[in-house]
Amino acid sequence: MKLHTFRIGGVHPDDHKLTAEIPTKKAELPKKAIFPLSQHIGAPAKPVVKRGDKVKVGTLIAEAGGFVSAPIFSSVSGTVEKIDNVIDATGYLKPAIIVNVDGDEWEESIDRSDKLETVESHPELTPEEIISRVKNAGVTGMGGAGFPTFIKLTPPPTTKAECVIINGVECEPYITADYRLMLEHTDEIIQGLYLLMKAVKVEKGYIGIEDNKPKAIEIFEQKTAGDPRIEIVPLKKKYPQGGEKQLVDAVINRQVPAPPAIPVNVGAIVQNVGTAFAVYQAVMKNKPLFERYTTVTGLQVKNPGNFLVRMGTTFGQLIDYCGGLPEGDNKVLAGGPMMGKSVASLDVPVCKGTNSITVLTGADAHRKKVQNCIRCGKCVSACPMGLEPYLLATLSAAQEWERLESEDVTSCISCGSCQFTCPAHRPLLDNITFGKGHVMGIIKARIAKAKAEAAKAKA
Amino acid sequence: MNFILSAVLVLGAIGLIAAVVLYACSKKFAVYEDPRIGQVQEVLPGANCGGCGFAGCADMAGALVKACDGGSLEGLLCPVGGQAVMDQVADLLGMAAANSEPLVAVVRCYGTCELRPRVAEYDGLMTCSAVNATGRGETGCGYGCLGCGDCVSACNFDAIKMNPETGLPEVDEDKCTSCGACVKACPRHIIELRKKGPKNRRVYVRCVNKDKGAVARKNCKVACIGCGKCEKVCKFDAITIENNLSYIDPNKCRLCTKCVDECPTGAIVKVNFPVRKPKPAPAAEEAKPATATATAQTTAKEEPKTVNSNDKEEAKA
């Protein structure tokens, strides 16, 4: 069998899937749950509760604050203590709702049974109904970036969706949350895929899984054997296969053009397995997004594992449950070691996009000494977007924004392959991300200016 | 012989034709430039720092002449040359110079290594703008100085330097031309251009933290907690408190220094005031101008933080 993969670049970091065979446990309820109002890309949510209000599990506590936004639901039952600024993953203080936990009382509208609801048995579900339920349940991308899912399901009218691709790649080292989900909730994910296909009115669904998860490939192939509409695509292990554009290339062999093009421009809608599961729960079980699968891992962590975590639980509590922080210097990442962001405090809560808490210890926690660029070109061959990282990094450091834009810095997906592969340990990604942020700002300002001028010309 | 003569003749003829063409072109395509622009540019310092808001001194000279034709030099100031240069320019153009007070850059953060404990270690790109984009940095304060020296590298006049002991930048008032390059370079807007003040005396809030008092104080011992004591004690309405942060309006402040004594955290400082002798005898209260410690910063209170501040003076002296 020939395995597919994306065509350019990519690296092969060590797998370290320590927790792959550890079944998921339910994490303990927190004593205090923290819900940051900005858990997704887009406008922050607006709180609809106030101090002293009683909330149950699944109660709406903040509504969407704009078109690109998502509502937030309480994951615990108890009393709203306050709405205050608390530390978020970047270390800055951001507004959040803090709930004191008391018991575990669920909203009655949530179906808590394990019975599998199939799409065939619910013909009343129209595509519009599915999208509206997904929107109202606050489902966002569960792979990390956290883009509100309903927007992905309503592609721009100039494009036409042809297939849904479920992302079961999990190419980041260490993380196993998606893998455990695939093994433990296979049927639900398949029903979630049917729902997504129905929502965007397509007849073809793919599930891309890397070949380092043979069990997941096998179980999905068994369960979908009778349905020609769904195809399981085993992929050759390579990082960053889980990137949307890389996955579209690997699975259906089409290339997404440079931004602002998105996968749907070539007919694909990509969703994470976690998102498919959340969509199933939101539509069939009327359960909003308030808990997720998260891996707590690290080579020196005593009892790493996979957990079903109520959002709002702090990193510190989960790490304590796993045996506490190892001795010495630790770097705690929200996400995996390739793309995860290190957190400045353990009081950061688990959010919609927190797929893993990775603890790097000792030498792993520190960067290696930066040396001079020897022009070996390894970063260029590793870049999955076909960019020239060494050049982009130099231009960013020199603040040459125009040149940076013409070199397509906005195509960078921040996968970190360049920095991983650099033999001189140069901080390539740091520089590029910084430059990219600046260039994006310039482009946004330019668009806003053009819009304002167009409005002026009209008036 | 004939060979040399023909070469001289040919080259001479080419030269003559070229000269005629050049002369004709220079007459035909001549662009008139106001001769005053050149004269004004001579007077300007020639640092090309851009502090005036124009691309360089030539650009500024053009703008000045244009403003002269417009009737007023209001709003144009060379911060490097200051009032002296502006007066010369005004003389040259036969105008009255707009009055301006000399400014100086002040660093509004005093979270030194001891006063603002480090809670994490930053291990990445060492520029302030990168650290600021990544997160709050190594300390608990999301507003304070990051200490990577973007301001130092922005300064064209060698007027701002990192103090390795405090980890904070320090401005050399004699060298600072108030061009504003450091103000633009600081991603956290900590540096402000303030009036130099009479005898270089200034009173300002040395903090930009907008967190609530308890949070701010927990992260830094000299943070402004927005308690409002200074606002109450000020007789001249110079102090406003917004977002848990006090700000002293330099145009209203009369340098009475009551707020300095009132501030419970020592976030308000007075600089270049005569050092008061520690003895409480009333005779010792007499003002004595500081000379050697012209740039020394001190508060009048006998508290540990004051001791720190004095230590710094000694280190500097």
Image (tube, coloured by chain):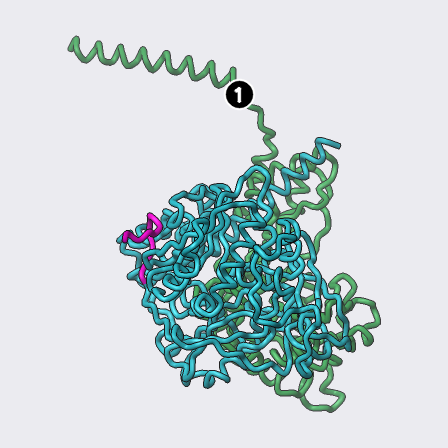
Left or right: A113 as drawn, with respect to A97: left
**B213 and B159: which is toward the camera:** B213
Crowding near pointer 1: few (<14 within 10 Å), some, many (20+)?
Answer: few
**A134 and B192: which is toward the camera:** A134
Numbered marks: total: 1
Q: Bounds of the magenta span?
A: A1-12
Query: Where does residue A204 sit, x and y in percent of width and height?
Result: 47, 47
The answer to whether residue B239 is above or below residue A419 is below
Residue in view at x 36 percent, y 66 percent: A215
Query: Where does residue B268 sit, x and y in percent of width and height?
Result: 69, 74
For chain B, the rendered hue is: green
For chain A, the rendered hue is: cyan
Kindly identify which chain the residue marked by label 1 belongs to. B
**B180 and A380: which is toward the camera:** A380
Give the structural element (helix, strand or loop) at label 1.
Answer: loop
Which residue is labeled 1 in the image? B30
Residue in view at x 55 percent, y 67 percent: A90
Query: Where does residue A342 sit, x and y in percent of width and height?
Result: 48, 70
Q: Is residue B135 visible?
A: yes
Q: Is residue A432 visible?
A: no
Residue in view at x 64 percent, y 73 percent: A75
Question: Does the magenta portion include A8?
Answer: yes
The answer to whether residue B178 is above or below residue B264 is above
Left or right: B34 as drawn, with respect to A342: right
Q: Amino acid at mark 1?
A: Ala
Instruction: Give the residue at the far left of this rendering.
Output: B1
Query: Which quadrant does the C terminus of chain A fall into?
Result: top right
Question: Does the magenta portion include A232?
Answer: no
Query: Where does residue A199 sit, x and y in percent of width and height?
Result: 58, 50
Q: Main secondary structure of the magenta part?
A: loop
**A291 and B214: which is toward the camera:** A291
